């Protein structure tokens, strides 16, 4: 009986010890430091997989456990940056600086965040032209430099000043020629703090079946545009004629309707865009008082265009789509190999019983007419030409493309 009692006692003691060990292990593994260690491994795994959303959620839960961990704030701020969430990064670092006002690393990170620049497209190889938009927090100036090596051995960024020297960023940078481009960029804060210099590399290998890169003669199209800009003539688009054999092309100048044909070299009437995918820009002219508006394109070895006193245009860059408006008429166009091509014609006319509406010569209701137009006009990417450059400036831009 005594032996049995001893055995029960021993078993009870061992059980108590095991339970104590188990409780201790549970307590140990649930200590904040241990939980943080395990969750950090999970967060790092998400970061390595570029699953930034899950990494952010994990790091946020870690901060709930340890809200005064400086390294966690810095880690989460870094992931926000990787995910392109600069505003969230700055907000986080501001909150962290309030919680840990003596943390020098947080203050430094916040100052750096105020000068960080994001770039719209990831570096890599592209078969189409790339437009790069740079962005930084408000009131920060962005500077960049583009260098290029490759078959063209030149950079073709939009800004006329771009190319192997530093420029202040004003508008998106277009890379539309074959080659390997290296873009160095950074921002400067209001107090003169210069942020980290970063570099992105883009390789442009245009699809020759789409862009005919070997057929583009830089000198020809540039000089053709410059001649028209200086008052020379262009060929008016021929899509209005019925392709009759005896059709005689009509040529004119964008300055014909202006008083005395005078060209004010400082007037901001010119701009450019890329409507189709041939790598050559379209040039727009928006005359004084928005009266004369023209759209010019280099097609089949010459400058062709649309426009005049009562015309207006909207276009969607990169998608070869534009709307040409004239009184009671709206034409949906694209640029083809030989000229402007009509894809849809919407117009109205006054009949005995009132206004009549047509879509490609088929009579429709007014609501159908308005609906057909609104699908284009309500598209936020459709833009009206806006005079932005003087004659001298647009010529300089063209020469440096």
Image (cartoon, helix red, strand yellow):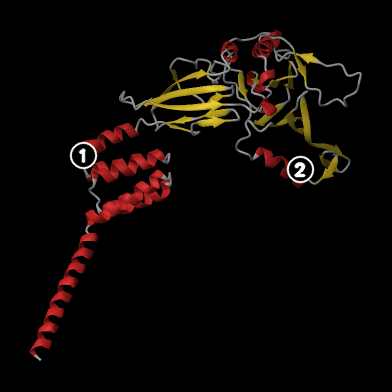
Pick the residue in front: 213 or 364: 213
Tell me where residue 8 appears, x and y as whole percent. 14, 84
Image location (x, y in percent) of residue 356:
83, 41
Badge 1: residue crowd in 10 Å (few <14, some 14–19, many ≥20): few
Q: In the image, is residue 204 above or below residue 32?
A: above
Which image quarter: residue 86? top left
In what element is the residue under mark 2? helix
Q: 220 or 344: which is nearer to us?
A: 220
Q: Which residue is mark 2?
A: 369
Disc ID at residue 232: none
Q: Is residue 281 left or right of 257 when viewed as pictured? A: left
Q: Position of residue 185 (x, y in %)?
A: 42, 25
Residue underneath mark 1: 103
Sooner in the amino-acid sequence: mark 1 or mark 2: 1
Image marks 1 and 2: residues in contact by CB distance under 8 Å:
no
Whether residue 336 is visible here, answered yes or no, is: yes
Judge the density around disc 2: few (<14), some (14-19), many (≥20) Cα neighbours within 10 Å.
some
Residue at (70%, 8%) from the top-left corner?
260
Where residue 194 appears, x then y in whole percent? 33, 24
Q: SS for tag 1?
A: loop
- Quadrant (top left, top right, bottom left, bottom right) of the C terminus: top right
Name the foreground residue: 113 vs 190.
Answer: 113
**Left of 261 or right of it: where is 115?**
left
Q: What is the quadrant of residue 79 in the picture?
A: top left
Q: Quadrant of the N terminus?
A: bottom left
Does the rendering let one see residue 328? no
Extreme residue toward the front, this view: 3
């Amino acid at each position: 009986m005594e032996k049995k009692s001893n055995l029960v006692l021993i078993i009870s003691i061992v059980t108590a010890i095991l339970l104590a060990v188990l409780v201790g292990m549970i307590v140990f593994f649930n200590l904040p430091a241990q939980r943080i260690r395990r969750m950090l491994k999970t967060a790092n795994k998400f970061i390595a997989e570029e699953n930034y959303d899950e990494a952010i959620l994990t790091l946020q839960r870690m901060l709930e456990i340890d809200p005064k961990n400086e390294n966690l704030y810095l880690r989460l701020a870094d992931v926000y940056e990787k995910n392109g969430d600069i505003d969230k990064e700055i907000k986080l670092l501001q909150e962290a600086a309030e919680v840990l006002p003596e943390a020098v690393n947080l203050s430094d990170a916040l100052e750096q965040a105020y000068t960080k620049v994001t770039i719209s497209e990831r570096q890599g190889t592209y078969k189409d032209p790339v437009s790069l938009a740079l962005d930084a927090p408000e009131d920060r100036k962005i500077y960049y430099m583009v260098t290029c090596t490759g078959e063209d051995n030149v950079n073709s960024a939009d800004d006329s000043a771009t190319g192997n020297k530093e420029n202040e960023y004003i508008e998106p940078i277009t890379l539309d020629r074959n080659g390997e481009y290296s873009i160095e960029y950074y921002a400067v804060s209001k107090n003169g703090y210069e942020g980290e210099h970063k570099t992105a590399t883009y390789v442009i290998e245009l699809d020759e079946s789409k862009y005919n890169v070997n057929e583009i003669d830089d000198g020809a199209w540039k000089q053709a545009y410059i001649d028209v800009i200086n008052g020379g003539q262009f060929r008016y688009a021929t899509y209005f004629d019925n392709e009759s054999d005896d059709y005689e092309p009509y040529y004119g100048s964008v300055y014909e309707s202006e008083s005395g044909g005078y060209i004010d070299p400082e007037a901001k009437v010119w701009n450019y865009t890329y409507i189709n995918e041939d790598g050559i820009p379209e040039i727009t002219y928006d005359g004084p008082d928005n009266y004369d508006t023209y759209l010019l394109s280099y097609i089949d070895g010459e400058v062709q265009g649309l426009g005049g006193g009562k015309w207006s245009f909207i276009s969607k860059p990169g998608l070869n789509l534009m709307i040409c408006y004239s009184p009671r008429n709206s034409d949906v166009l694209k640029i083809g190999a030989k000229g402007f091509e009509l894809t849809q014609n919407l117009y109205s006319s006054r009949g005995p019983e009132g206004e009549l509406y047509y879509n490609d010569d088929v009579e429709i209701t007014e609501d159908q007419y308005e609906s057909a137009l609104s699908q284009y006009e309500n598209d936020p990417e459709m833009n009206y030409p806006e005079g932005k450059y003087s004659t001298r400036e647009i010529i300089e831009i063209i020469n440096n493309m």
